[in-house]
Amino acid sequence: SSSNCAGTPGGAMKVVRDSKFRHVFGNASKENFQDLRLSSKPLETTGIRGNSKFICVPWEAGGGGTLAVIPSNKFGRLPRDLPLVSGHTGGIMDFEFSPFSDNLLMSASEDTTLKLWQIPDEGLKSHLKDPVLTLEGHGKKVSFCTFNPSAENILASTSFDMTCKIWNLAEQEAAYSIPVPDQVMHVKWNYSGSLVAITSKDKKLHIVDPRQSKIAVATKICEGPKPTKVEWVGNPSSSDECNTLITTGMTSQADRQICMWDIRKMPADGTEGGNLTTLNVDQGTGALYPFFDPGTQMLYLAGKGDSNVRYFEVVNTDPYFHFIEAFKTTVPQKGFDFLPKRCVDVGVHEIMKGLKLESTAVQPISFRVPRKSEAFQEDIFPDCVAGLPAMNSDDWLSGQDRQPILSPMKPGMQKVQGSGGAAPAVVSVKDLKKQLAEAQEKIKALEEENAALKAELAKAA
């Protein structure tokens, strides 16, 4: 139960808070994806990803090294011989769709590589073995990969080689490699893509400033040994409020807890500091994954192995968290993720759309504000992240900061991605070798021609 959550009876409920989101409810859609044969490999990542076109889950074939990418409208029972993304030689530890193209998928593997895949609009018709590009450079298995939310072709990854690398996909190389002190448990870019938050096995939160190639500040975040997770919170319309984060972890008494931190108060030496508040949630055992929606200032907590999703309103003064409700089911979740905000159905006042991963199914969950009016509800749908890059990789590498491009949510006014989603303009190694061989042939021919002309000139003289 969530009896000691802020805002539950006996606590802060004596006065009813005025809020548009007090009555938000979760709703499991009638249509879902069934007969999934999921990989049994335990992952530290969310375990499922989705966008407006596809959902992606790790599949049981190939020792955890394959992914199923399913068109998001192909509900019902999945065929046994599903075409898979199957180019890795080791288990896949993390995967994520590009924020700027629904057709691009990045995977991080135990085989020490990261691979970028282009998924056709209609989904896979046969096994996909050839990636758009492969990133090589980590010395051990790659634990996480995540795209920069503002700059195109910039990606962060972490590995058991104790580094966080920032890749420029346009050049297929690591632009920065920052040592981290312990095995990484979670990785998140901040809203504008200027900093990377990392939680690690040393029970600390580290704020990486990639373009300075250093960990700027760090703090101890919990006592318990279980994996910690992190999410940035704050109001993007006020840059002053983009300095806060949520972490989840365990107390020494095995209570699950959420904490809020202010990076401006965190110490450079990584001791302890910057805590704004700590809330004990329950006695659960699985890692709690935090998801924050800037538009509604709501935080969702989905625990692996739980059969509920709790949600809160986040405010910038004490008590910081107001517990609203928990969406409860009878089936535990193996993973949970939310679609980009641009994918919600504003017509039914849907403010978030989640994907709940069960043992053989994916169940979409819709979080809605109950309102009778069928008109577009401007007050609950401020502009959201459009899914368009605010700058290119060179701008970002030169030190520029830009907030993500926003789009109105009113139907007919949304800014949309180009169709098909272009992969980065990269040349494969095979093509490069071919071009090099052709160039060398040409040089040889020109040298021979040059020698012949010199010989003729010598004769003429």
Image (cartoon, rainbow, N blue to C red):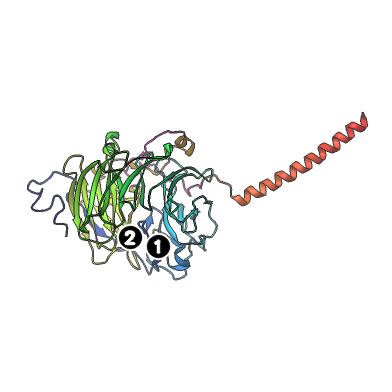
Residue 374 visible in the snapshot: no
Q: Overall secondary structure of the magenta stretch?
A: loop
At numbered mark 2, what does the secondary structure look like: helix, strand or loop?
strand
**Residue displayed at 13% across by 57% down:** 3
Up the image or down, 37 lies above or below 201; here it is below
Residue 323 visible in the snapshot: yes
Image quadrant for the N terminus? bottom left
Reply yes or no: does residue 419 show up in magenta: yes
Identify the mark at residue 335; answer none if there is no mark.
Answer: 2
Q: Amino acid at mark 2?
A: Gly
Counting labels gives 2
Identify the mark at residue 299; answer none if there is no mark.
Answer: none
| Residue extent of the magenta highlight | 399-423
Q: Amino acid at mark 1?
A: Lys
Residue 74, x across and y down, in percent: 40, 62
In-front residue for pair 429/410: 429
Residue 100, x across and y down, in percent: 43, 45
> Quadrant of residue 277 in the image?
top left
Residue 374, x across and y down, in percent: 24, 49
Residue 402 relative to residue 290: left or right: right
Identify the mark at residue 74; answer none if there is no mark.
Answer: 1
In the current view of this chain or complex, which residue is farthest to the top? 461
CA gap, disc 2 and disc 1: 20 Å
In-front residue for pair 291/158: 158
Up the image or down, 223 lies above or below 403; here it is below
> Quadrant of residue 242 in the image?
top left
